[in-house]
Image: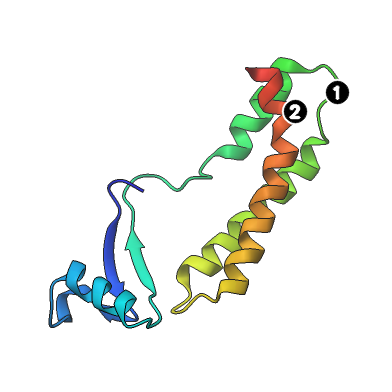
Amino acid sequence: EVGDIITAVNGLPVKTLEEPLDITVKNLKKNGSALSLVAGREGPPLLDNLENKLKAAYVAIDDGNLPDLEEVQAKIGDLKVQAASTASATSVSPEAMRRLRSEIDKLAKLLGPIAKTVA
């Protein structure tokens, strides 16, 4: 995302790289080597306070046609835990990223009817 700051490449802090970051990444790609980046992001976490905002939306809409609020809140909680675990890992496997993406997709599916009602 715009504004993200890359802090490590393949587990090495950017400050310790022998070459500039762009050259290091280009060389790794050219050689077909594995490339793992760690990025920092400023600002509040993406899912911060989502549960409270969701509850307020349910109260405002209150039409009985939305997915179960507790189920949605539980899914958000699970996703927060999984995202935090993935983000804090020293190395994230492609499988872990696929699982996280799958959980995000499931949450998006649950939130779809809510978004349509609010829009």
Q: Say the numbered circle drawn on residue 65.
A: 1
Three-letter code for the amino acid on which mark 2 is drawn: Pro
Q: Is residue 79 above or below residue 54?
A: below
Q: Say the numbered circle drawn on residue 9.
A: none
Three-letter code for the amino acid on which mark 1 is drawn: Asn
Residue at 86% over, 21% down: 64
Tell me the crowding category of disc 2: few under 14, some 14 to 19, or many 20 or more residues within 10 angstroms, Cα based.
some
Res. 8 visible in picture: yes
Tell me the crowding category of disc 1: few under 14, some 14 to 19, or many 20 or more residues within 10 angstroms, Cα based.
few
Which percent across, then down, holds residue 36? 39, 74
Residue at 29% over, 73% down: 8
Please give left or right for residue 18 compared with residue 41 in the image.
Answer: left
Res. 78 visible in picture: no
Where is residue 16, by image quadrant?
bottom left
Please give left or right for residue 14 compared with residue 19 in the image.
Answer: right
Quadrant where the C terminus lies? top right
Which percent across, then down, holds residue 115? 66, 26
For the residue pair 109 and 28, the one nearer the viewer reads as 28
Which residue lies under the disc numbered 2?
A: 113
Residue furthest right as drawn: 64
Q: How many marks?
A: 2
Q: Is residue 62 above or below residue 102?
A: above
| Alpha carbon distance from label 2 to label 1 | 9 Å
- Of the numbered discs 2 and 1, the one sitting upstream in the chain is 1
Residue at 65% over, 25% down: 56
Residue at 36% over, 70% down: 37
For the residue pair 9 and 33, the one nearer the viewer reads as 33
SS at circle 1: loop
SS at circle 2: helix
Please give left or right for residue 3 compared with residue 83 in the image.
Answer: left
Residue furthest front as drawn: 30
For the residue pair 102 and 117, the one nearer the viewer reads as 102
